[in-house]
Image (cartoon, rainbow, N blue to C red):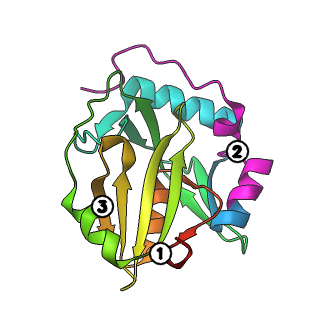
């Protein structure tokens, strides 16, 4: 089935739109913090892509109880925007995606053995939030002494979401879904 078959209400926060439009303060902040930003050509293109995905987009991904979104995407024959980087180099984008907050989220309460193992070997901890939802969805990134990183969901009894062999991979995974790191870091030697 194509398109989104129910009424959706766009999030009213301008910051969520502005982070995808060129020359906004939100994009400048993303460039400083993350070194890149995904932007549409302009506001009109954003509106056209949104409408096209609502009418013709395909549901993407697998059903994931840990993800608070349903995702719908669509490929376009012409570039709809760019990944821009701090050095100014653009990469054209031909794929658009809408994240729709799921009407109901089921939370599984179970003890996570992977977290208990981390208690002995962790080096640092960061909190990351998804600002699209209110209250924001929080994920916890734990860096281990061996350089590996695990991401846990505190709302699901600290269930392990994903493991990565290094911090850069974990960070890219979070940034891809537009999570933002909460300023600060908790170090194990400070506890």
Estimate the spatial distance between the alpha carbons at disc 1 and disc 3, rounded to whole Å: 14 Å
Return the residue nearer the eye: 106 or 60. Answer: 106
Q: For residue 29: magenta?
A: yes
The answer to whether one can see residue 127 in this image is yes
Dot placed on the residue nearer the N-terminal end, 2 or 3? 2
Percent x, y of residue 78: 53, 48
Hey, which residue is sitting farthest bottom in the picture?
A: 146
Residue 29: mark: none
**Crowd rating for badge 2 (residues with CA inside 10 Å; few <14, some 14–19, many 20+):** many
Residue visible at 28% across and 57% down? 160
Return the residue nearer the eye: 56 or 108. Answer: 108
Return the residue nearer the eye: 61 or 109. Answer: 109
Q: Nearer the viewer, mark 2 or mark 1?
A: 1
Percent x, y of residue 25: 80, 49
Residue 98 lies, with reference to residue 127, above or below; the image says above
Residues in magenta?
1-30
Secondary structure under the numbered disc 3 in the rendered image: strand
Dot placed on the residue nearer the N-terminal end, 1 or 3? 3
Per the image, the residue denoted by label 2 is: 21
Residue 165 lies, with reference to residue 161, above or below; the image says below
Per the image, the residue denoted by label 3 is: 162
Residue visible at 49% across and 75% down? 188
Percent x, y of residue 127: 52, 56
Per the image, the residue denoted by label 1 is: 168
Residue 64, by quadrant, is top left
Percent x, y of residue 131: 57, 41
């Amino acid at each position: 089935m194509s398109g989104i078959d129910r009424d959706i209400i766009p999030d009213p926060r301008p910051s969520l739109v502005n982070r995808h439009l060129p020359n906004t303060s939100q994009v400048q902040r993303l460039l400083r913090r993350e070194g890149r930003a995904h932007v549409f050509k302009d506001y009109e293109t954003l509106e056209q892509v949104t409408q096209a995905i609502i009418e013709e987009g395909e549901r993407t991904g697998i059903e994931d109880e840990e993800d608070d979104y349903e995702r719908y995407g669509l490929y376009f024959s012409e570039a709809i925007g760019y990944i821009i980087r701090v050095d100014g180099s653009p990469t054209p984008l031909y794929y658009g995606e809408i994240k729709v907050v799921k009407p109901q989220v089921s939370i599984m309460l179970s003890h996570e053995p992977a977290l208990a193992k981390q208690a002995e070997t962790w080096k640092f901890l960061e909190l990351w939030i998804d600002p699209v939802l209110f209250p924001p969805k929080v994920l916890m990134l734990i860096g281990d002494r061996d350089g590996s990183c695990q991401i846990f969901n505190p709302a699901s009894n600290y269930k392990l979401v994903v493991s990565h062999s290094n911090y850069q991979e974990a960070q890219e995974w979070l940034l891809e879904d537009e999570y933002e790191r909460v300023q600060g870091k908790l170090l194990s030697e400070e506890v």
